[in-house]
Amino acid sequence: MKRHHILTTGLLTALALSLPSQLVAQAKQSRPNIIVIFTDDHGYADLSCQGYLSDVKTPHIDQLAKDGVRMTNGYITAPQCIPSRAGILTGRYQQRFGLDANGSIPLPLEEITIGQRLQKAGYITGMIGKWHLDPNHQSAVWIKKNMAGVLEKAKGKKNNKIRIPERLRQKYDPNVRGFTEVFCGHIQRYFATYDLKGNDLAPGGEWQKEKGYRLDIQSDAAVTFINRNHNKPFFLYLAYFAPHVPLEATNKYLSRFPGEMPERRRHALAMISAMDDGVGRIRETLVRHGIDKNTLIFFISDNGAPLKRGMKDLPLTMKGGAWDGSRNDPLVGEKGMLTEGGIRVPYIVTWPGSLPEGKIYDHPVTSLDVAATALALAKQPAARELDGTNLIPYLNGTNSGVPHAALYWRFWNQSAIRKGKWKYLQVGGEQRYLFDLSSPKHEEENLIKKQPEIAKQLSIELKKWASSLKTPGVPDAELNGQEKEFYKYYFK
């Protein structure tokens, strides 16, 4: 048996030496690398492969769709940044742990991230770009609990920003929440464990000031991460800060969109184009290292575009509170709403050689599926606490069913359920809507009076789901100011 082992080892070595270097690299891993690209305030219409708008140019992301599966009904769990990010990174409805909206709490320390699960499975894990899950000056619930008296002292001050002590904030940083390597930041200041030349920084990481354009920096960091870790299983979460305001782009990208158009639109298109270039560079890097066929890529947005009720082309000097230039056509509504324009987003899954090419998938899927899929591909036992589903059997055709019996949402004073083609939406205590999302009229026709029994059954199922959350129940309070304006504008 010993002689047989030696002969077998020698044969395998000879075979490996005879293989092209790329095939050897592919064969090194039995488990795929996983990359999640998460964009920010990026509307449903704003990929050219979606087929709705002619001004957007995304050739590399379009190729991602041609090489994989494009979801026509891909959803996130909230129409706002923090809860949406908490959902995708835990694989759980964030309402289960009380992170319903911005301005409440950071991602609780007891919640387990995809990074932590895959670290345990032996993956190198990386996080780049926008984190937004640590406590900040708007985390009112957390501040009241952890910084007693601070909120009262801040009342009435012109600048109501509260500084979170470093000793408290650090517990929530990505490098201690499951990410081996980080390059975390929004524009030019990043907390990093490596530099863009690929060198290790101080143990535990350090702050870096980077020159250049924020999206190019984030793409550079992603390419560097892959270069550093191409010979081992890795998970990379790349959270681009775009096309979220402040709108900014270099002439390299702006020059691709000449002619008359709103300046906010031009800048959004330029920022999306910069991300598209980054996707192209990432894929080139995977090919160069011979791991393109052993890498699954998700491309998803964190919520719909903030249209600000009319897409007004306000001056670019207005940094916040304005349209970010992105669009949600043909969907109704925008960021902050549980209509389709707030929660249905660009969603692509690509895994060359393992998933079909150019497939269009129409059944509803959710960002919660990322964690469940990643865990299955890492050959780890299913985690019962996850709310998502491993998508691979559905996308490759081995499972002809649907990934989800129903999907649920609760945000501010809105709640919703989608089951098959039907969507039931409750807004405050009085407004009720039932939509047939397979209809050309989708959310432009309220069918609740025509189909009261369907609405009643969906309402019961929604209430049952809501009863299992940390703060139980379907909200029926008066709408807040933003909600009143949203629903008055879109449902006249």
Image (tube, rainbow, N blue to C red):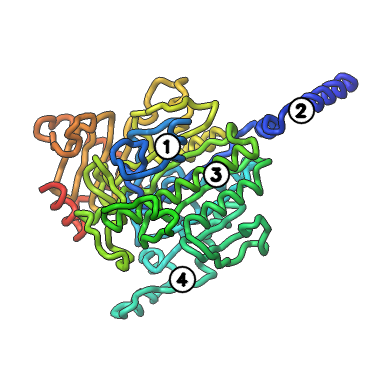
259 or 360, which is in the foreground?
259
> Hey, what amino acid is under mark 1?
Asp
Circle 2 SS class: helix
Choose the circle earlier in sequence order: 3 or 4. Answer: 4
The three-letter amino acid code for the residue at tag 2 is Ala
User: Would you say 448 lies left or right of 378 here?
Assistant: left
Residue 272 in picture, x, y percent from top left = 40, 49
SS at mark 1 in the image: helix
The residue at which mark 4 appears reads as 164
| Residue placed furthest toward the right | 3
> N-terminal of the two: label 1 or label 3?
1
**Residue tagged 1:** 62
What distance separates the C-alpha of mark 2 from that of mark 4?
A: 54 Å
Tell which of 70 and 451 is nearer to you.
70
Q: CA distance from mark 4 to mark 1?
A: 41 Å
Q: Nearer the viewer, mark 4 or mark 1?
A: 1
Q: CA distance from mark 2 to mark 3?
A: 26 Å
